[in-house]
């Protein structure tokens, strides 16, 4: 294969992590680099869908049924403390350190995740710089609604991501970054190019919605996601958990009494569906910006999906 890296992307609940793990097990010399902006945090497991068991592939799923269970190495998960504001600049530093470590040991990196900005920054070789806080800009924007802030963010022409921007605080930070780049004429394209074979897991919209709904109720009713958030609130301020959006936003609002349980479940389910839609919009945008994505049907049997990727590897 001429590609330097395999990338497997897809919206939430598409099964991309399981596919990446099975591919790595089949290859036998691959390691996974996560591209998930929230799975970097320790203790945020259920809400981020960390599912570390996915990285263990059972014998019957491998090419050789005599093999013992395969534990696929993974990276960039559980590397930051809950409450921190891990960002794209840090991700790039961590990604490149991990990437060179993996290829230096003669292994193949598989980049896998659903955070489009993280993935595109790697595949398009964007190098970001640390951006200081802009107190006057934050003051100016503090009373804007999330919808107004998102519209402002869309006006910038440089690389930005609205996928994860589901709280005003995060939207203001995103605008702060884009404004800093605009005023300082930052040259982003400085990292070396990597050649990626990029695979997208394509899941039918209605099936995706069903899987999201089923998974949410399982996390709430069987995996006790509320308890996870309650534990986090013992060491992380509510506003810092709300910053992370989605599960941590709505469950925190429930835990501090601002939403009833029914309101929390209803609003969170809608937010996750919207999040998945934004993910797909971002991935389609990546294609328009020159990244070729080979889409594979999520409903295909695992062996067929893995074999299709192997075929593409031989073609590339």
Image (cartoon, grey):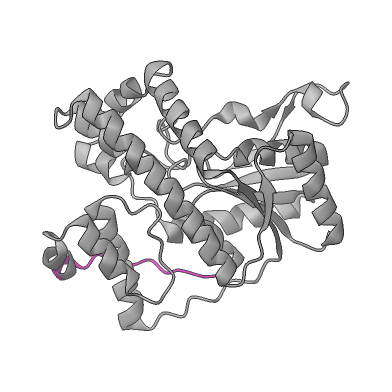
Q: Residue furthest top?
A: 222
Q: Residue furthest front?
A: 206
- Residue span colored magenta: 126-136
Write the residue at 73% across / 54% down.
103
**Which quadrant of the rendered structure holds the C terminus?**
bottom right
Q: Is residue 231 left or right of residue 311?
A: left
Write the residue at 70% across / 51% down.
109
Q: Which percent across, then down, holds residue 305?
A: 75, 42
Q: Is residue 200 left or right of residue 311?
A: left
Q: Is residue 292 left or right of residue 88?
A: right
Front-lying residue, 314 or 93: 314
Q: Is residue 238 above or below residue 124?
A: above
Q: Is residue 58 visible?
A: yes
Q: Is residue 134 magenta?
A: yes
Q: Is residue 99 above or below residue 17?
A: below
Q: Is residue 202 above or below residue 54?
A: below
**Which quadrant of the rendered structure holds the N terminus?**
bottom right
């Amino acid at each position: 294969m001429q590609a330097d890296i395999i990338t497997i992307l897809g919206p939430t609940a598409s099964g991309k992590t399981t596919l990446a793990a099975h591919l790595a097990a089949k290859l036998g010399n691959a390691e996974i680099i996560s591209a998930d902006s929230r799975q970097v945090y320790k203790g945020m497991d259920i809400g981020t869908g960390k599912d570390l068991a996915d990285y263990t592939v059972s014998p019957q799923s491998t090419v050789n049924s005599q093999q013992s269970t395969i534990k696929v190495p993974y990276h960039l998960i559980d590397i930051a403390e809950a409450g921190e504001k891990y960002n794209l600049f840090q991700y790039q530093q961590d990604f490149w350190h991990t990437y060179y470590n993996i290829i230096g040991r003669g292994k193949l990196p598989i980049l896998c995740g659903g955070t489009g900005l993280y993935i595109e920054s790697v595949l398009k070789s964007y190098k970001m710089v640390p951006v200081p806080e802009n107190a006057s800009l934050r003051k100016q924007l503090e009373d804007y609604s999330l919808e107004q802030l998102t519209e402002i963010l869309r006006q910038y022409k440089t690389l930005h991501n609205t996928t994860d921007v589901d709280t005003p605080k995060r939207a203001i930070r995103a605008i702060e970054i884009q404004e800093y780049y605009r005023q300082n004429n930052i040259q982003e394209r400085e990292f070396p190019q990597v050649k990626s074979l990029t695979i997208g897991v394509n899941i039918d919209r209605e099936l995706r919605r069903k899987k999201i709904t089923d998974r949410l109720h399982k996390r709430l009713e069987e995996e006790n996601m509320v308890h996870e958030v309650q534990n986090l609130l013992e060491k992380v301020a509510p506003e810092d958990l709300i910053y992370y959006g989605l599960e941590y936003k709505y469950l925190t609002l429930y835990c501090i009494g601002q939403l009833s349980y029914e309101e929390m479940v209803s609003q969170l389910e809608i937010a996750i569906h919207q999040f998945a839609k934004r993910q797909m919009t971002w991935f389609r945008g990546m294609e328009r910006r020159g990244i070729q994505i080979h889409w594979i049907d999520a409903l295909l049997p695992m062996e067929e999906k893995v074999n299709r990727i192997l075929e593409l590897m031989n073609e590339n």
